Image (tube, grey):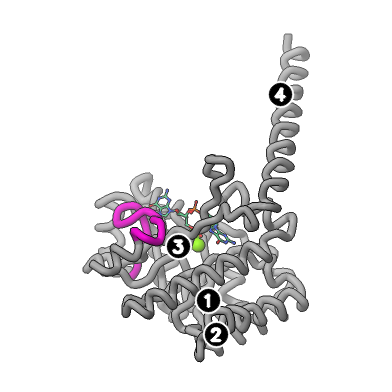
Amino acid sequence: NAKAQGRNCLQFFNQQIQKDAERNAELHLYLKTALSQDEFELYYQPIVNPFSGQIIKAEVLLRWVHDGQFISPDEFIPIAEESGLIVQIGEWVRMQALTTVVALQKRHLAIPLSINVSTIEFWTPDLQQRFLAYFDVIQQKLGLDEFPYSLITLEITESLMMKQQETINQLLTELRHRGMQISVDDFGTGYSSLSYLANFPVDQIKIDKSFIQKISSGPRHKALIEAIVSMSRALDLAIVVEGVETQVELDYIKQQDIEAVQGYYFYKPMPQEAFFDLLAK
Ligand code: C2E
Ligand code: MG
Ligand code: MG
Ligand code: MG
């Protein structure tokens, strides 16, 4: 009967919640030792000019393999954020990414790299100090006379950002002053996307892949992309469209005269060696 069904349903949900909690606890445990066990690796996904196919820059994407199992960043990044482990993980990512930049410079293949940053990493004034100071750590470790700030874009997504506006604003202003670019990732998905543009100094937006993936399902989605594009132009922001997979999507991007795309149509994220080979070609 209906009552028993309701009870079964509830039981099912309770079991699911329990399972999720166990999985999270387990991942949290493994995550604590992932750095020391050398379980992380960076992948690189080129961002290209849709007209020429030329590689303009690349996004750095973190990969975690634990016990032979690939675990998606969409699953472990939130756990790293909740537990604070994201701070050390983020530092590791930036150290590796800058090591890559320097290696590419030596081969005369340097292109700008776009690095994802969780705003939890500069959530308090102390963390902001640490965030800035870590660039000096990298510079020293890599023995650089000059830090290649202009070859780095920071990609930021986080609605929590709205809570520390004043200090985060100062940090981003400082980073831009040093020559870094700031990009708003997954643009259009957060409830505060427009406030970002009003309140923070940014150079670029990345239109979330959900937009391009819906262009065939009706005129409203196209209208939305076109509105975002014209707004970005009015605000003098660069645009990257994420998630371009098909010829139809690419043709549409070209029609809109958009200058940069990222997606499986051109390249999937790849390990460093393949990335270097690609750039050398
Ligand atoms: P994101 O920053 O929006 O990165 C783009 C995601 O879209 C990547 O997923 C990429 O593999 C995927 N993608 C690229 N082209 C296509 C396409 O044509 N079709 C589809 N379906 N997907 C495409 P990935 O690598 O699984 O990363 C997921 C998210 O995890 C990232 O989204 C980012 O928010 C986060 N993340 C990854 N690496 C880091 C990191 O080093 N630090 C932080 N804080 N977050 C990271
Ligand atoms: Mg990103
Ligand atoms: Mg994105
Ligand atoms: Mg994302």
Say which label, 1 or 3, has the lower sequence index.
1
Q: Residue furthest top?
A: 1
Residue located beneath label 1 in the image = 182
User: Depth check: 268 or 234 in front?
Assistant: 268
Residue located beneath label 3 in the image = 207
Q: Residue at x 33, y 72 (%)?
A: 56
Q: Looking at the image, is 239 positioned above or below residue 10?
A: below
Q: Secondary structure at mark 3?
A: strand
- Contact (Cβ within 8 Å) of mark 4 with mark 2: no
For the residues labelled 2 and 1, the Cα–Cα distance comes to 7 Å
- Contact (Cβ within 8 Å) of mark 2 with mark 1: yes
For the residues labelled 4 and 1, the Cα–Cα distance comes to 44 Å
For the residues labelled 3 and 4, the Cα–Cα distance comes to 37 Å
Please indicate, yes or no, whether residue 155 appears anywhere in the rendered image: yes
Q: Which span is picked out in magenta? A: 259-274
Residue located beneath label 2 in the image = 176
For the residues labelled 1 and 3, the Cα–Cα distance comes to 14 Å
Say which label, 4 or 2, has the lower sequence index.
4
For the residues labelled 2 and 3, the Cα–Cα distance comes to 21 Å
- Is residue 214 rendered magenta in the image? no
Mark 4 CB lies closer than 8 A to ligand 1:
no
Residue located beneath label 4 in the image = 12
Q: Residue 234 at what x, y percent from top left?
A: 43, 79
Q: Secondary structure at mark 2?
A: helix
Amino acid type at circle 4 is Phe
